[in-house]
Structures are given as structure tokens and as C-alpha cells.
Amino acid sequence: MDPELDALEEKLAQLVQRMDALREENRDLRQQLVTRTDESVRLAEKLAAAKSRIEALLTQIPETET
């Protein structure tokens, strides 16, 4: 075969391989994003609940006169 054609074929094969790797990485990153987003929501809910409990406890503390 023509050496230029062989080189082009090799470059194309490398490009396809790289594209496949990037697609896989993109899929993994999207899954990580979903996981982190879910975790963020869960932590925000825990934080809101803790804030509510602390505020409730603070209302039960008698105020001191100074």
C-alpha cells in the first residue's frame, strides 16, 4: 500500500481509539456528577435538619440578664 495511506489509516485508527476513550471517560464523569449531586442534596438536607435542631435548642435556653 501507499505509505501515506498507511500513515493516514494509522492516524485515523488512533483518533477512533482516542474518541472511544474520551466517550468512556465522559460517561464515567457524568456518573460521578450524578453521584456527587445526589450526595450534595443529601448533605444539604442533613445540614438543614441540624440547623433546625440547633435553632430549636437555642430557643429553649433561658436568656440571661446582663
Image: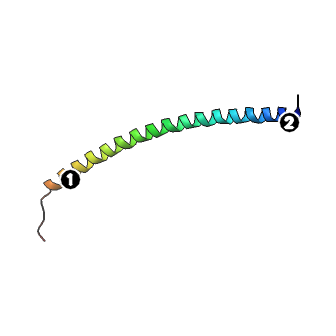
Q: Position of residue 41 (x, y in %)?
A: 35, 42
Hey, what amino acid is under mark 1?
Glu
Between circles 2 and 1, the one closer to the viewer is: 2
Quarter occupied by residue 16: top right
Report helix, strand or loop for mark 2: helix
- Picture residue at 20% right of the left edge, 53% below the top: 55
Q: In this rendering, is residue 44 above or below 2? A: below
Q: Quadrant of the C terminus?
A: bottom left
- Picture residue at 18% right of the left edge, 55% below the top: 58
Q: Position of residue 54 (x, y in %)?
A: 23, 51
Q: In this rendering, is residue 53 above or below 16? A: below
For this orientation, the residue located farthest to the bottom is 66
Q: Position of residue 64 (x, y in %)?
A: 12, 65
Is residue 18 toward the left or the right of residue 56 in the image?
A: right
Task: Answer few, some or many: residues within 10 Å of disc 2's Cα (few below 14, many 20 plus, some between 14 and 19).
Answer: few
Residue closer to the observer: 25 or 4: 4
Residue closer to the observer: 37 or 20: 20
How many numbered marks, from 0 up?
2
Q: Position of residue 26 (x, y in %)?
A: 56, 37
Quarter occupied by residue 20: top right
Is residue 22 toward the left or the right of residue 46 in the image?
A: right
Residue closer to the observer: 45 or 8: 8
Quarter occupied by residue 9: top right
Disc 2 versus disc 1: distance between alpha carbons? Answer: 74 Å
Hey, what amino acid is under mark 2?
Glu
Residue 34 image label: none
Which is nearer the N-term, disc 2 or disc 1? 2
For this orientation, the residue located farthest to the right is 2
Report helix, strand or loop for mark 1: helix
- Picture residue at 39% right of the left edge, 43% below the top: 40
Location of mark 1 (residue): 55
Location of mark 2 (residue): 4
